[in-house]
Amino acid sequence: MKTKLKTVFTPLQAFGKSIARQFQPKYEVVCTTYQVIPGLPISKNEQKHSFDRGTGIQAKEFYTKVVTSDMTKTMAPVEVRLRKIYLKGKTVEQAEFGPVQHLKTLSTTKKKK
């Protein structure tokens, strides 16, 4: 009797998990590096690593690996963001190495002129 119930409920549980996964958010880790060369405008390079729906734990682990990496810390100025995307993108966590805020204000003031 128990084996018959397991054969019926196991596919139903898998179906329920696949339906629930459709309503979970996607995640992405965005790493932005800024390059400053005197006399030239500030350039930035974005690298995005996308994660599927329901993989928030893997995205968080990847984010912590990037933030704790020695390479990220030596490449200053760098901005690393963990974004949660459901309907709109929302930054969940953010780490900055170097004068990122100062560079953002410089690049926006130069664009306004």
Image (cartoon, grey):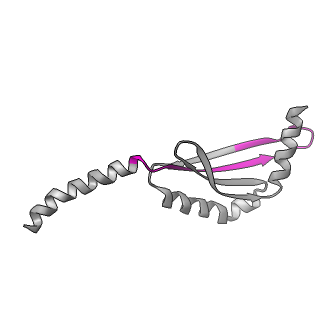
Relative height, residue 27 to residue 6 (above, below): above
Left or right: where 22 falls relative to 68: left
Residue 35 percent across, percent down from the top left:
80, 46
- Can the viewer see residue 70? yes
Q: Is residue 18 left or right of residue 62?
A: left
Q: Does the magenta stretch include residue 44?
A: yes
Q: Residue at x 89, y 36 (%)?
A: 110
Q: Looking at this view, name the residue that lies furthest to the top.
A: 113
Q: In which quarter of the image is the C terminus?
A: top right
Residue drawn at x 79%, y 54% as measured from the top left: 77
- Tell me the quarter of the picture where residue 94 sits: bottom right
The quadrant holding residue 98 is bottom right
Q: Which of 80 and 33 is in front in this view?
A: 80
Membership of 33 in magenta stretch: yes
The percent position of residue 56, horizontal first and vertical second, equals: 50, 57
Task: Report the number of numbered marks.
Answer: 0
Residue in front for this viewpoint, 40 or 93: 93
Residue at the far left in the pictured view = 1
Span shown in magenta: 22-45
